[in-house]
Amino acid sequence: MDAAASPLPSLSVVIPVYNEGASFRRLLEAVVAAAKFPFEVLVVYDFEEDDTLPVVQELAGKFSRLRAVKNQFGSGALNALRTGFAEARGDGVVVLMGDGSDDLSVLPRMYEHFCAGSDLVCGSRYSPGGQQIGGPVLKKWLSRVAGISLHYLSGLPTRDATNSFKMYRASLLRSLPIESRAGFEISLELCVKAFLAGYRISEVPCVWRERTAGRSRFRLLGWIPHYLRWYLYAVWHRWFGRRPRRAGARE
C-alpha cells in the first residue's frame, strides 16, 4: 500500500532487535499480512555484527519500506526505542518486539482505535480476551498484578500499561519528554504521562507468547525499581497530585 497515495494515516512499525536473525523473516511476513494500512518498518540495531542485519538487507530488496537504523543514543532497548521514535515518518508509531511474541492479529483493531481518535492504543494481555502464554512465572505474576492494580489505583484506562506492544500517535511522542534510563519501562512512563496529560487511551486484548528463538534483553530484577517509579508516580497523581493538562486535551 502506497502511503503517499492513501488518505489513511500511516504507521511506522519500530522493531528493536538483538540477534533476531532466526525469527525476523517470519516476523516481517506476519506484519505485512496483518497491516491493512500504509506503513513502514524500522529495524533498530546496536552493532554491525547483529545477525538480524543480513536478513534485513536481503528483505529490503523486496520490501522498499523496510529500513535498518543504527541506535543513535547508545546501546540497549530504551535507546533503540528512542531512536525509532526519532526516525519514524508515520502519523503513528507501533512498537513490536523482534522475537515475534506480540499478537499481530490485533493490529487492524488497534488501527481502528487509532483512526477513531485514540492517541495511544495498548495491546493488553490482562483485559478480557487477553492472554499470556509461557515465560517465567515470577515475571508473569508481577506484570499481571502491576497492570491490573495500576488500572484500579490510578484510573489508567488499560490493564496492561507495562506492555511494550503499543500504538502511539506521533504528535504524542513529540510532546512528552522521556526520562527513563534503564529499558522497557519507557512504555509505562509514556502511558502514565499520556494519561496525566489528557491524551485519549484505549486498549485491545491481545495474546503474548514467549519467544522461541534468540535471547531476551529483559532484566527483571534490575528494572523493577524503574517500573516502580512510574507506578508510584501514577498512583500519587491520582490521589494527591494535580494533573497537568495539555492544551486541547480530549476528555
Image (spheres, grey):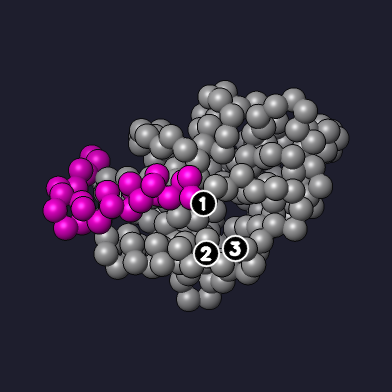
Question: Horizontally, is 79 left or right of 18 in the view?
Answer: left
Q: Percent from the top left, x then y, of residue 119?
A: 41, 49
- Ranked by sequence position, the earlier of labels 2 and 1 is 2
As drawn, the label of residue 132 is: none
Helix, strand or loop at label 1? It is: helix
Q: Are discs 2 and 1 less than 8 Å apart at CB?
A: yes
In the image, what residue occupies the spot 15% across and 49% down?
241
Question: Horizontally, is 58 left or right of 99 in the view?
Answer: right
Q: Is residue 195 above or below residue 14?
A: below
Q: Is residue 231 magenta?
A: yes
Residue under label 1, please give it: 220
Q: Percent from the top left, x then y, of residue 6?
A: 61, 43
- Ranked by sequence position, the earlier of labels 3 and 1 is 3
The residue most toward the front is 221
Give amino acid for label 3. Answer: Pro
Residue under label 3, please give it: 136
Q: Are discs 3 and 1 less than 8 Å apart at CB?
A: yes
In the image, what residue occupies the spot 66% across and 61% down?
210
Q: What stretch of residues is rendered in magenta?
A: 220-247
Quadrant of the frame with the N terminus:
top right
Q: Percent from the top left, x then y, of residue 70?
A: 65, 26
